[in-house]
Image: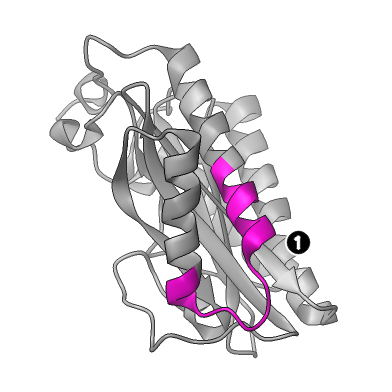
């Protein structure tokens, strides 16, 4: 499949609506995070997520909401959480949401920390800083998707974190993007277009049993 085919969109696609979908998804992430507190189980956080999305008037969920506590922050999207852990007073967690708004796919996620553990705080800050560097590389250098994740791996190592190379971003568009079968952003050999790709960054602490996650639309 050529690059143009991998970036195909439907007749309803509009970049402004992609950005709107992303803003709404971020609004949901922030509202959910405001309702998560120590003592809550992962399953309770997911139920809260569903409630918030319904309150915001989502059209539908296009991928399951993942909220991962503690050691489960090392899990990839396709892996199930271990058990139903309780969020601790000194803990780390992330939210990952895929939601359809006005026929367009929002996909957003980031990491939060409870308490004041310095290494957890550093981990959450590092994943956002790494994401910002990689997104800036996309904006400023016009590199391929493959080169983008090569750069991410180099920068993660230099920063002292372990990049999960199984997580390499993906297509979005008007729903459903899956009909285009574009593959991972990190395998795309063209220059990724704006409003079509989600950049995903997941890191692990080099010695402790947790990690962090951040994703957003390249636009």
- 32 in magenta: yes
163 to the left or right of 106: right
- Taking the image as shown, residue 156 lies to the left or right of residue 173, namely right
Give the magenta part as a residue range. Answer: 28-44
Residue 53 point in image, percent of width and height: 45, 44
Frontmost residue, 39 versus 186:
39
User: Looking at the image, is 64 positioned above or below residue 37?
Assistant: above
Q: Is residue 127 above or below residue 143?
A: below
Looking at the rendering, which quadrant does residue 136 occupy?
A: top right
Left or right: residue 119 versus residue 43 is: right
Q: Nearer the viewer, residue 165 or 36?
A: 36
Residue at 43% x, 22% y is 193
Q: Quadrant of residue 75?
A: bottom left
Q: Residue at x 30, y 23 (%)?
A: 174
In the rendered view, tell whether residue 36 sits above or below residue 193: below
Main secondary structure type of the part rendered in magenta: helix
User: Where's residue 110, x and y in %?
Assistant: 60, 55
What residue lies at 58% left-to-right and 78% top-to-bottom?
Answer: 40
Which element type, helix, strand or loop, lies under badge 1?
A: helix
Q: Position of residue 213 (x, y in %)?
A: 56, 61
Say above or below: 191 vs 55: above
Q: Which residue is mark 1?
A: 125
């Amino acid at each position: 499949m050529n690059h143009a085919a991998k970036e195909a969109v439907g007749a309803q696609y509009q970049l402004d609506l992609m950005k709107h979908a992303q803003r709404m998804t971020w609004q949901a992430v922030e509202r959910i995070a405001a309702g998560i507190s120590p003592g809550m189980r992962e399953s309770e956080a997911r139920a809260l997520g569903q409630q918030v999305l319904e309150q915001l008037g989502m059209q539908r969920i296009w991928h399951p909401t993942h909220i991962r506590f503690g050691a489960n922050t090392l899990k990839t999207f396709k892996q199930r959480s271990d058990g139903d852990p309780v969020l601790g007073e000194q803990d780390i967690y992330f939210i990952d949401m895929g939601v359809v708004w006005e026929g367009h796919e929002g996909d957003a996620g980031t990491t939060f920390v409870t308490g004041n553990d310095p290494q957890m705080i550093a981990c959450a800050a590092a994943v956002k800083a790494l994401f910002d560097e990689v997104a800036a590389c996309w904006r400023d250098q016009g590199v391929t998707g493959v080169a983008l994740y090569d750069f991410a791996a180099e920068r993660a190592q230099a920063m002292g974190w372990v990049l999960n190379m199984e997580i390499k971003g993906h297509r979005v568009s008007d729903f459903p993007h899956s009909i285009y079968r574009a593959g991972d952003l990190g395998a795309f050999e063209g220059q990724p277009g704006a409003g079509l790709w989600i950049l995903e960054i997941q890191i692990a602490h080099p010695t402790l049993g947790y990690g962090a996650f951040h994703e957003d639309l390249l636009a």
